Image: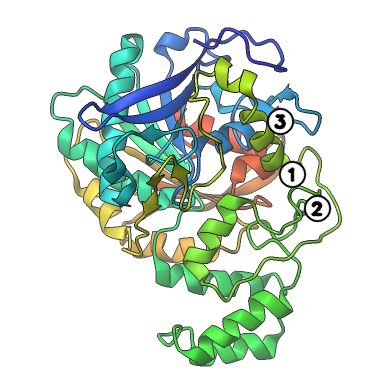
Amino acid sequence: QIVSLPDAPEVTFNQFAGYLQVDEDTDLNYFYWMVECEGCEDPQSAPVALWTNGGPGCSGLTGFMTEQGPFRPQANGTLRKNDYAWNQVANMLFIEQPVGVGFSYSTTRTDYIGVGDDDAAMYNYKLILKFLERFPEFQTNDFYITAESYGGHYMPTLAKYIVDNNDDGAINFRGFAVGNPYTDPVENTIGTVDTIYGHQLVPRPTYLKWLNRCKNGERQTSYCQALQAKMWNKQMGNLNPYALDYPVCLDDSGARKFTPQQARFLYATKGPLVQAAAGLPGDPEDYDPCADDYATTYLNRDDVKAAIHANPEITWGECSIKTTYGHLVYNYSWSDVPMEPYYQYLLASDYSPALKMLVFSGDDDSVCGTIGTQTWIYDLGYNVTSEWEAWTYEGQVSGYVTKFEGYSFATVHGAGHEVPTYKPAQALSLISAFFNGDDWLM
């Protein structure tokens, strides 16, 4: 248990952090940080939701510190309370996976090499079992898995692994929610270009060239790659493609266009033609583009590591593309396998009770643009039961919901790639409705 968290506000909920040994044979240790539900009458009967960030190779503590966790790091080294934390409605389990990410580690070299989606699903399944072993009071609670970005791979593969291996009902698995997911590489690329053109960030002649030559099958030719590079690097300029209408961090430690998580994912999906830049004025209320830097500084403090029971020898980083721990090297095997078959498998499954599945999408993101997500969501081939109904927060339209037989799709208007970062109140409203199974959403 975390007894005292340095420079943090007083809270009324319990916190636990440390390691879960997911493989005793190889001493594979995943770091977790669990916060009990603050807004629930009885946390021990409230849902439990696992959260991991994407990357692949990016820490779930990034979500904890900059998205939907109970605290937000400040420039002065303190933490402030996040009034829109998801532990207002659920017990939240933030994890760092796979091995080599954040504080997670193994003493066996081979654990760091050649890790891919299937390995991640298996070890995350083991992690959940270990968590429930350590916290038996949550064994019968509804259990959900949540993520974003490359979580579009993590969540469907983990959900399938649970469905295929949970015969004894050790996990009371109820479903998953994933935001701005990387699902289909083809529709992802098309969606990106259509989004930046839809935002009027590139001229029509360039877009028409791409539309006529590249949209329907020639995207990897040198001509099309050059067009994409022109749109991204020259014409779109100093904008953050993950949140087109938001500022970027310009402080000395992070004068860059992207956070490490964003840069990692962007390079993998769009290729080396994309370069980083910085500079956009304006600052929407309650949004701090440098929060990632503050989180890194905070989590590397010796007193913080001691408080959260983290390995003091590890230097925490938001993302671990190739990270050394002693002589050990981590490298994740990126996958471009389309994820639609996983959704279809889960929807056709006789798993009981039927899983709840929510895909949500911030429409200010161009990297996993809502346009591309709409395409594969509709192409799954399931009947629409309610189409494009506006949903509101405090009387204002916050996005649109389309319900299908077995799953739902919701947009979050004005949110970037990391929805809870940009629209925290709306994100909390949405995830609360998901957990509750509210009719307007599910």
Report the residue at 44% width, 38% height from top: 146
Q: Do the residues labelled 2 and 1 touch (CB within 8 Å)?
A: yes
Q: What element carries label 2?
A: loop
Q: Where is residue 181 in the image (x, y as percent from the top left)?
A: 46, 53
Q: Where is residue 226 in the image (x, y as percent from the top left)?
A: 57, 86
Q: Which of 293 and 354 is in front in this view?
A: 293
Rate crowding at label 3 as few (under 14), some (14 to 19) or many (20 or more) other CA atoms within 10 Å.
Answer: many
Badge 1 is on which residue?
Answer: 290
Residue 173 visible within the image: no
Which mark sits nearer the N-terminus, 2 or 1? 2
Marks 1 and 3 sit apart, C-alpha to C-alpha, by 10 Å
Rate crowding at label 1 as few (under 14), some (14 to 19) or many (20 or more) other CA atoms within 10 Å.
Answer: many
Which mark sits nearer the N-terminus, 2 or 3? 3
Left or right: 259, with 58 as reference point: right
Badge 3 is on which residue?
Answer: 73
From what the image shows, is residue 12 above or below residue 365? above
Q: Which amino acid does label 1 sit on?
A: Cys
Of the 4 image quadrants, the one containing the C terminus is top left
Q: Where is residue 339 in the image (x, y as percent from the top left)?
A: 32, 58
Which mark sits nearer the N-terminus, 1 or 3? 3
Left or right: 131, with 272 as reference point: left
Residue 131 visible within the image: yes
Q: Nearer the viewer, residue 149 or 40?
A: 149
Outermost residue, right side: 281
Q: Which amino acid does label 3 sit on?
A: Pro
Q: Position of residue 261 (x, y in %)?
A: 56, 51
Badge 2 is on which residue?
Answer: 250
Marks 2 and 1 sit apart, C-alpha to C-alpha, by 8 Å
From what the image shows, is residue 368 above or below residue 90? below
Q: What residue type is labelled 2?
A: Leu
Q: What element carries label 1?
A: loop
